Image (cartoon, rainbow, N blue to C red):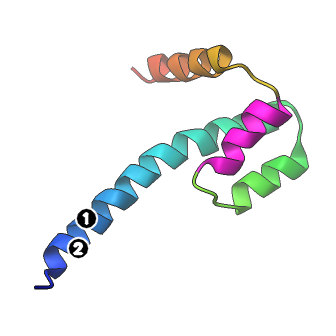
Amino acid sequence: MYNPIFTNAFVNMFLLILALWTIPWKVYALWTAAKHNHKKWFVALIILNTVGILEIFYIFKIVKKKWVDVKKDFKNALSSIK
């Protein structure tokens, strides 16, 4: 039997999880592109929504950041919110 309430709840939860995954990567990649004056990457990152894939590629392959640096930047950003 089709239950639209369950389906909507599942879709909403999936979209929430997707947003919680995508938004920090997008913000971090945009911040990094602006900091490195990569204007074309900034525009591409702001226009294209690739669920974090392009953002992660940019951070690790183009800017060549290490996971330790990314982790430290995320921790610093979270600690400044408190």
Q: In this view, which residue lies farthest toward the front?
A: 1
Q: Image point 38% across, 50% down: which residue?
A: 17
| Vertical placement of residue 1 versus 16, above or below | below
User: How many marks do you count on the picture?
Assistant: 2
Characterize the magenta stretch by its predominant secondary structure. Answer: helix
- Residue 61 lies left or right of residue 16; in this view the side is right
Foreground of the two, 81 or 78 = 78
Question: Element under label 1?
Answer: helix
Foreground of the two, 53 or 25 = 53
Q: Give how far across and how far down residue 45 sits, in percent.
A: 73, 52
Q: Quadrant for residue 58, please give it.
A: top right
- Residue 15 lies left or right of residue 52; in this view the side is left
Q: Is residue 73 magenta?
A: no
Q: Is residue 60 magenta?
A: yes
Q: Give how far across and how far down residue 79 sits, in percent.
A: 46, 16
Q: Residues within 10 Å of mark 2 (few under 14, many from 20)?
A: few
Q: Image point 88% across, 41% down: which residue?
A: 38
Disc 1 target residue: 10
Spatial separation of the CA atoms under disc 2 and disc 1: 5 Å
Q: Amino acid at mark 2?
A: Thr
Q: Amino acid at mark 1?
A: Phe
Q: Image point 18% across, 81% down: which residue?
A: 4
Q: In this view, which residue lies farthest toward the left?
A: 1
Foreground of the two, 1 or 13 = 1
Please state the extent of the stretch shown in magenta in the rendering. Answer: 52-63
- Quarter of the rendering occupied by the N terminus: bottom left
| Vertical placement of residue 80 versus 19, above or below | above
Q: Image point 84% across, 35% down: which residue?
A: 62
Labels 2 and 1 touching (C-beta < 8 A): yes
Mark number displayed over residue 7: 2
Is residue 75 visible to the viewer in this orientation of the structure?
Answer: yes
- Quarter of the rendering occupied by the C terminus: top left
